[in-house]
Image (tube, rainbow, N blue to C red):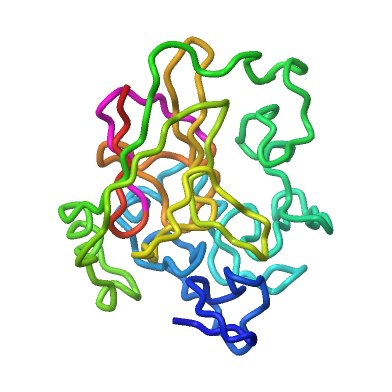
Amino acid sequence: MPVCPSGHNSTAADFCDVCGMRIQGAPPAPASSASGSGTGGSGAVGSGAGAAGAAAAGGAGLREPGEPCPQCGTERTGQFCEGCGYDYRTATPASSTGPANPAGAAGSGYPAATGYPGGSATPGTGPQAAPPSTCAGPAWSAVVTADRSYFDRVIAAGGPDAAAIQFPAYCPERRFALSGRELRVGRRSVSRGLEPEIDLTGPPADPGISHLHAVLVAQPGGGWSVLDPGSSNGTQVNGKDIEVGVAVPLQPGDRVCIGAWTVLTIGA
């Protein structure tokens, strides 16, 4: 496990997730030949969530490997730099206060007025304005588990780190109530000011999960959808890859697969 200059153990190899200090000498994350990307934390696992369908996805062009960020040098994994938030498509540097806001980026494919994260758009304005109310109807939840069958498919798909990844001996079930307009799914990062509402930091830490991996978005008439904003290893719904920036409606019982073994089962 990487150790920062202050002596903290960190689940991320670039910035310490305890104090935010840069971990010196950490090698850049390897690019995944399957998904055409590096990692959001360490996830070049050739994940089944994006490995098979990334080339055909409409957002596949956002995942060009090996290109260093002109602002911080982090290897490119999507439209937005996971190190500083630089927007490759619009060549917009990140603000000094945190990552760039994908909600306001032109042509990003992200809903324009969802207000994520700390969005600049005002709800109720513009042609794509967010609904004025939160998800209506029965309470929904997401149950997070480690799924062995999904893990086996990920490993079978191959990838630079596949041989080094082991299925966790124990992974407690976690349940998250779905409320509000949207919930970010990923791993918290002190250095990037990212605190996802569905925090899958661990332990055990799934190495294929990006700091910002997916977003659950409430629908105006009730229910939820899931969107992948450009994660390193992609997202699957019921075993099928979803396109970057495209919200996919969810039904009770749907399985959202991310990382190397993590599955979110949606229920109402």
Quick check: 10 above or below 84? below
Q: Horizontal and vertical percent for residue 243? A: 45, 40
Observer-nearest residue: 163 or 206? 206
Q: Is residue 258 above or below residue 114?
A: below
Residue 157 relative to residue 182: left or right:
left
Residue 162 vs residue 97: left or right? left
On the image, the x and y values in percent for residue 264 come to 32, 41
Quadrant of the rendered structure where residue 44 is?
bottom left
Which image quadrant: the C terminus? top left
Magenta segment includes 250:
yes
Q: Is residue 105 left or right of residue 184?
A: right
Q: Residue at x 29, y 40 (%)?
A: 240
The residue located at (73%, 40%) in the rendering is: 118
Q: Tell whether 196 sits left or right of 236.
A: right
At a point 62% along the width and 61% down the height, the residue shown is 82
Q: In the picture shown, does residue 204 fall above or below 135?
A: below
Q: Is residue 24 magenta?
A: no
Q: Which percent across, then down, holds residue 223? A: 42, 19
Q: What's the magenta region?
A: 246-258
Residue 112 shows in this picture: yes
Q: Is residue 144 above or below residue 177?
A: below
Give the residue at x 31% y 52%: 262
Q: Is residue 38 visible?
A: no
